[in-house]
Amino acid sequence: MADTASTSAQPKGATGVLVLADGTIVWGKGFGATGSAVGEVCFNTAMTGYQEVMTDPSYAAQIVTFTFPHIGNVGTNAEDVESAVEGAVGCVVREEVTRQSNFRAEREYVEWMKDNGKIGLSGIDTRALTRRIRQSGAPNAVIAHEPSGKFDLDALLQRAMEWPGLEGMDLAQRVTRTKHHNWEGGSWKLGHGYGRAAFDARPHVVAIDYGAKDNIFRNLVKAGAKVTVVPARTSLEEILALKPDGVFLSNGPGDPAATGEYAVPVIKALLDMDMPLFGICLGHQMLALAAGGKTTKMHQGHRGANHPVQRVGGNWGATEGLVEITSMNHGFAVDAATLPDNVIETHRSLFDGSNCGISISGRKAFGVQYHPEASPGPQDSFYLFEKFVGMLG
């Protein structure tokens, strides 16, 4: 991990490389797509769900280091894709990718990565790389795969050094839907796939797509709503023309302050008219910005399916202090110290004390930093969808 571009010797048989912006070179065996891609290197601690991770738009412009050593054993299938748009650009794994061994598997992970244009790198000391991220922060890097093993390391290093990083970057416009879309998919059932819901007389949610996971919309349907998905830059007038009973603010990649330049004025206007609002991840962060708070870039971020979050404020009653096991994927966070008096912190991470939820006094508006639709609990957090739909009346 201490090698640099000028001193690192390429091991025999190395067909993949990770070049960090500080000159560190990590050699491995490439798989998936060939070529190179630039992004921020992060780590994810989940033991499964790698296909969902790689297709989550919140991972756009990121290279995911999987801390679990055996990736590939459940294969891939068409049902577990979270979005058809851009997700993670590549991944780093410890062991050579495992052959599929699951009754739902349709394709090998290596083949799926190749066909989806994502670069993989195996044979890496992922513990060392994870420690580096924890100690020094998430670095910018280029991941490359070339079967011949021939790489222009100087060019890859230059690309990594010139990439500006996620801070200040609006990525929502890269991953959002471009047209209005009436969502029709229901929840998944073994042997039946995704169902379709009847939408007559259901409350209407307009979901602003900043890079949403499809499973969020399925959970809104499961909770009793009908959903219209709209692009990230949809105007206030266009949203109101759809006659929503409530507005959902989705997850997504990039810096919330950058996306907030056009999103926050719309959210503020919705708050002023007391429109019911629910935000997840990026949507939660921009709700906080609209309420007068600030966000900050995290040192290493939170990414995994085992994050404990405690209910700490609000009208929880007997469930005050209850801990939810949550799924997270974020490199930015709401700075709780900047929240105005009318914004209540409702959830807090038990890992580092960072903000994980807010509600706004006098308004039907709340948000959470984690992903309740990912269901690692597995049902710890579904109440949030029910709470939102219950507000719509």
Image (cartoon, grey):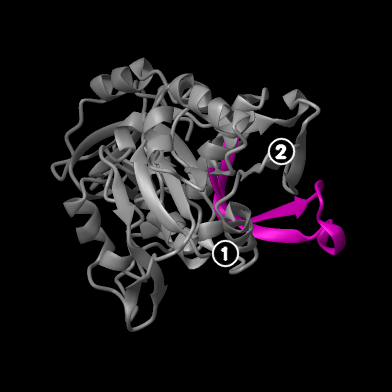
* Vertical side of 20 occupied by 308: above or below: below
Secondary element type, mark 1: loop
* Vertical side of 54 occupied by 236: above or below: above
Question: Which of the 4 image quarters holds residue 355?
Answer: top right
Q: Residue 331: horizontal and vertical position, in percent? A: 54, 35
Q: Residue 13 vs residue 189: left or right?
A: left
Residue type at mark 2: give it. Ser
- Magenta stretch secondary structure, dominant: strand
Q: Which residue is drawn at 26% across and 65% down?
A: 78
Q: Residue 293: horizontal and vertical position, in percent? A: 68, 24
* Vertical side of 187 occupied by 86: above or below: above
Residue type at mark 1: give it. Pro
Residue 76 shows in this picture: no
Residue under label 1, please give it: 376
Q: Residue 10 vs residue 297: left or right?
A: left
Q: Which residue is drawn at 57% across and 64% down?
A: 376
How many discs appear?
Answer: 2
- Asked whether 196 or 166 is in front, the reply is 196
Q: Residue 113: horizontal and vertical position, in percent? A: 24, 53
Residue under label 2, please give it: 354
- Asked whether 377 or 142 is in front, the reply is 377
Instruction: Measure the alpha-carbon separation of dots 1 and 2.
Output: 20 Å
Over which residues does the magenta segment extend?
300-329
Per the image, is 280 magenta?
no
Per the image, is 313 magenta?
yes
* Vertical side of 151 occupied by 93: above or below: below
Secondary element type, mark 2: loop
Q: Residues within 10 Å of mark 2 (few under 14, many from 20)?
A: some
Q: Which residue is drawn at 70% across and 40% down?
A: 358
Q: Residue 75: horizontal and vertical position, in percent? A: 31, 68
Question: Which of the 4 image quarters holds residue 262?
Answer: top left
